[in-house]
Image: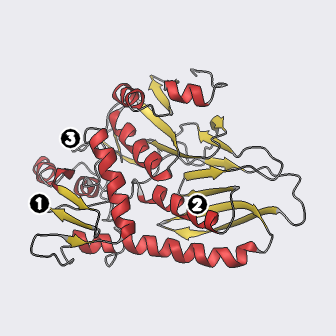
Amino acid sequence: MYRALLLVFITLLAGCSPSEQVVRISGPTMGTSYHIAWIGQPDSSKELQPLIDERLAAINRSMSTYDPESELSRINRGLTATDGDGWMPVSADLYEVLNDAVDIYRKSGGLFDISVGPLVNLWGFGPDAALDEVPAADKLEAARQNVGLDVLILRPQPTAIRLSAPRYLDLSAIAKGWGVDDIASLLESHGLHNYMVEIGGEIRTAGAKADGSLWRIAVERPSSAPGDRSIELIIEPGDSAVATSGDYRNYFEQDGVRYSHTINPFTGRPVTHTLASVTVVLPSSAMADGWATALDVAGPEQGMALAEQYDLPVFMIVREGDHFRELASSRFKERFPHYRNEAY
């Protein structure tokens, strides 16, 4: 799913010694871009960037719905061979992401559903060409019949999946976060423990900057004006991941009604609640990414109830007429004791 809220990251670095400096690299991936910074030798990017690019390309070849020959696309098109019991072998990477997705699906009561792709595509927010029009009722109902993740069964050894009914699986609401975790592991395997990894707005930080201070992450203030980027909140997540989801950048309007890209899998329609954005802070970027989408679908009341139920650090910006109000979960307030609720 398109990440409507871009998390702006702040990397003010000072005091680097000649042998230990901030190293920055960036590049395209997953239909968006990545930005990575770490503290290390100045020439370390020459070794690491090719490895990072290769790894991200491999993840894309496995999980992209925009690549018709990706591992996931071949499953969606029914091109993956099954054994006599209907099991389809999948890579360890794809299995791990699907396992995370199923975990959030169950805990969220189905609000996070990677089989919602037919509805996303029908509303014009997927790989298919956008029509910017409300789908016909009969088409919506037909698409809803092909949504629901209870038909997916996972087998850990050897890694395989089985579908009791056809499904179109779309990992765009969790794959970028999983990619962030994977690249963080790659950096750590090369002895780098002070870094920030960002892919398409999903961020994970570890350690500290060269001056000893923590990495700082800014959450964007909601605005539908093109190019309008202002800061709502700045946090220091420490060794954690941060993901934000919102509804105000990717949408279309018809007959004066605004239709968001965030689709409720139960109604088959874009959400209509007042939640403008939701930010989740967790150890895993994949889980933060998925939960941000789940809570975005849920809305402020149900979403905050889920945050409290599962002890999630969650920050919300909610519309109140022409104004906005901030909400924070108990765990968020514990993690960031200097946070103060505001309305504006």
Amino acid of disc 2: Ala
Badge nearest the viewer, 2 or 3: 2
Amino acid of disc 1: Ala
Residue 63 visible from this viewpoint? no
Which residue has dot 2 on it?
184
Residues at marks 2 and 3 touching, judged by CB atoms closer than 8 Å: no
User: Callout 1: helix, strand or loop?
Assistant: loop
Q: Nearer the viewer, residue 89 or 122?
A: 89
Image height of 239 relative to 308, above or below: below
Residue 48 location (% of width, % of height): 66, 74
Near mark 2 (Cα within 10 A), the count class, few <14, some 14-19 or many ≥20, is many
Residues at marks 1 and 3 touching, judged by CB atoms closer than 8 Å: no
Which residue has dot 1 on it?
165
- Give the numbered dot on residue 266: 3
Residue plotted at (29% across, 58% down): 131
Q: Quadrant of the N terminus?
A: bottom left
Q: Nearer the viewer, residue 90 or 279?
A: 90
- Give the numbered dot on residue 174: none
Q: Total label count?
A: 3
In the rendered view, does 57 fall on the left or right side of 104? right
Amino acid of disc 3: Phe
Q: Earlier in the sequence, mark 1 or mark 3?
A: 1
Residue plotted at (43% across, 71% down): 60
Q: Quadrant of the C terminus?
A: top right
Residue 87 location (% of width, % of height): 17, 69
Badge nearest the viewer, 1 or 3: 1
Badge nearest the viewer, 2 or 1: 2
Image height of 296 relative to 15, above or below: above
Q: Earlier in the sequence, mark 2 or mark 1?
A: 1
User: In 3D space, how far apart are the residues under numbered discs 2 and 3 (Cα atoms)?
Assistant: 35 Å
